[in-house]
Image (cartoon, rainbow, N blue to C red):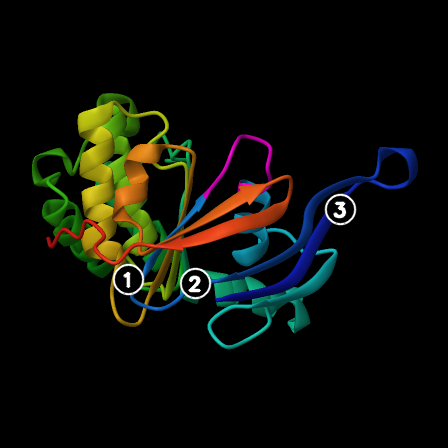
Amino acid sequence: MLCRSVEKVFGEGDTRTPVLRGVDMEATYGELTVLAGPSGCGKTTLLSVIAGLLDATDGRVEVLGTEPALMKESQRVLFRRINIGFVFQQFHLLPALTATENAAVPLIAAGMKRSQARDRAADLLDRLGLGHRLNARPRELSGGQQQRVALARALIHEPRLLVADEPTSALDAESGRAVMDLLSSLGRSPDRALIVVTHDERVFRYADRTVHMEDGRIHRTEMNPSPSIHHA
């Protein structure tokens, strides 16, 4: 994943607000990249531009060897569905569906038979320690359990780019550590790039590289020669 001179401006005229100011950044296969910085510095906006949820105002974004901005909208939607997994801060689980059904949504949307999609979702949830909660609905799950379902949903279609926005912000220390252990073990693979947005310093030790943002710019990048890596 590559960003070159990326800018993002919201509004026009008197309401024009620059959020990204010439960002250069890379994320490499097999690595966990942490995007860090204070609230309002542009982290989530940059993540949304990388994931194709927002268009950059200027600059170039290359994801998995292609530039989504050059695609038609229908092609971009398909590209995201196949190649990108999302872990959102607020989980966004569907309240009427069970844990298994929530995790299976990306596979069903891609056309897989429901029974096969549910079987794959159940297997992954079991790996995540939720084998006993497969039929529970979101309101019946703790915050940490909901986050694991969200993680399963993000990983179920084996995306090549996994992006997570503040995955530990709503969790206590133990649950946050468990989620990062899972991201570290399941998200890291030789053919996958993993980007985590956070201001939680507990997450930094998991990073192969930490990219620090301030005021819409990359302030510095630090490499970690010995990140915490957990294997599921």
Label count reads: 3
Residue visible at 42% across and 31% down in the picture: 90
- Which mark is on residue 215? none
Q: Nearer the viewer, mark 2 or mark 3?
A: 2
- Residue behind mark 1: 113
Residue visible at 45% across and 61% down in the picture: 81
Name which of mark 3 and mark 1 comes first in the sequence. 3
- Residue behind mark 2: 27
Residue visible at 11% across and 49% down in the picture: 127
Q: Is residue 41 magenta?
A: yes
Q: What segment carries the magenta color?
A: 36-43
The percent coordinates of residue 69 (x first, y second) are: 65, 67
How far apart are the alpha carbons under marks 1 and 2? Answer: 34 Å
Dot 2: few (<14), some (14–19), or many (≥20) neighbours within 10 Å? Answer: many
* Tag 1 and tag 2, C-beta contact below 8 Å: no
Disc 2 is placed on an element classified as loop
Identify which amino acid the numbered label 2 is placed on: Ala
* Tag 2 and tag 3, C-beta contact below 8 Å: no
Disc 1 is placed on an element classified as loop
Name which of mark 1 and mark 2 comes first in the sequence. 2
- Which mark is on residue 9? 3
